[in-house]
Amino acid sequence: MSTRRQWLLGLVLACACVAVFAQVPAPGCGAANDWVQVPGGVLQQPSGPVRIEAFYLDATEVTNVRFAAFVAATGYQSTAERLAPDTGGAWGSAVFRAPTLGAPNWWALRPAAHWAQPQGEGEAPLDPQRPVVHMSYEDASAFARWAGGRLPTEAEWEYAARAGQSGELPRPTPDAANSWQGLFPFNDSGDDGFKGSAPVACYPPNAFGLHDMVGNVWEWVARDETRMRPGMGLLAGGSFLCADNFCRNDSVAGRQVQELDFSANHIGFRVRYASPPAEER
């Protein structure tokens, strides 16, 4: 990397980190443990019981401040920030917007959208404690390796999300998770306290001490090579866009098959560890 490019990267990261620390978590959002130990047990699935060995899992989704530290330490450039080979412009990422007469679609590809600019540009300073979004599978996997872990498997994720509960579980109420209240996609009333994503740990943890396993942002799980088509991965748990009249995937059974290189402002992740994670480099 040239000296000029290094200097520019350093300037960008410095600005990003200033933005990250420019706001504090929303009032009422409690601090959470960095990670929790998920005890071993059995996950009952339609195909039969699955034995889950004990592991460690981030108590919350990976936040903007943690991802900013990763970028500052490694110079990592997310998928959305990279240059598309055919145009030379940034890949960009998908951003949700309420439809209007002039823009009836509720998703738009914005070239300037990435983890440090969730809406694309011209937005408020980045909240350090909100989940990092616009994450592709590669982005999530790269951070997990740097942090000393990996993405949880689908079975590990569901076992952790259930926290000892079995059977079909109801979708959470607005005081238990972040989702969409009102008529989707036109109006989110914010009855759960937030329109859009919420800072992590704003809602009570489950019995294992894990926050936001359902709703808030979709979470990548480890790709199952035996089940997924090439180029495809799996998201779990639903997001703040799940509503009574749309999606309804804000549950422990919520799943969405997704292209591995796709990112959007409602996709994040958390990390699974084999042993208590050391302080991040």
Image (cartoon, rainbow, N blue to C red):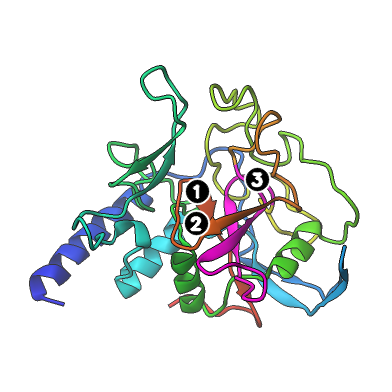
Farthest-out residue, top: 101
Q: Which of marks 3 and 1 is nearer the N terminus?
A: 1
Q: Residue at horizontal 50%, vertical 48%?
A: 130
For this view, does 198 lie left or right of residue 176?
Answer: left
Residue occupying the point 60% across, 23% down: 189
Which SS class for mark 1?
loop
Residue 130 — which label? 1
The residue wearing badge 2 is 63
* Residue 148, position as x, y percentages in the image: 53, 80
Q: Name the residue under label 3.
A: 215
Q: Are marks 2 and 1 in contact (CB under 8 Å)?
A: yes
Between residue 68 and residue 97, name the one nearer to us. 97
Position of residue 123 relative to residue 74, above or below, is above
Rounded to the nearest angstrom, the CA distance separating label 2 from label 1 is 5 Å
The local crowd at label 1, few if under 14, some if 14 to 19, many if 20 or more residues have their Cα within 10 Å, is many
Q: What stretch is highlighted in magenta?
A: 214-239
Q: What secondary structure is the stretch in magenta mostly built from?
A: loop
Residue type at numbered disc 1: Arg
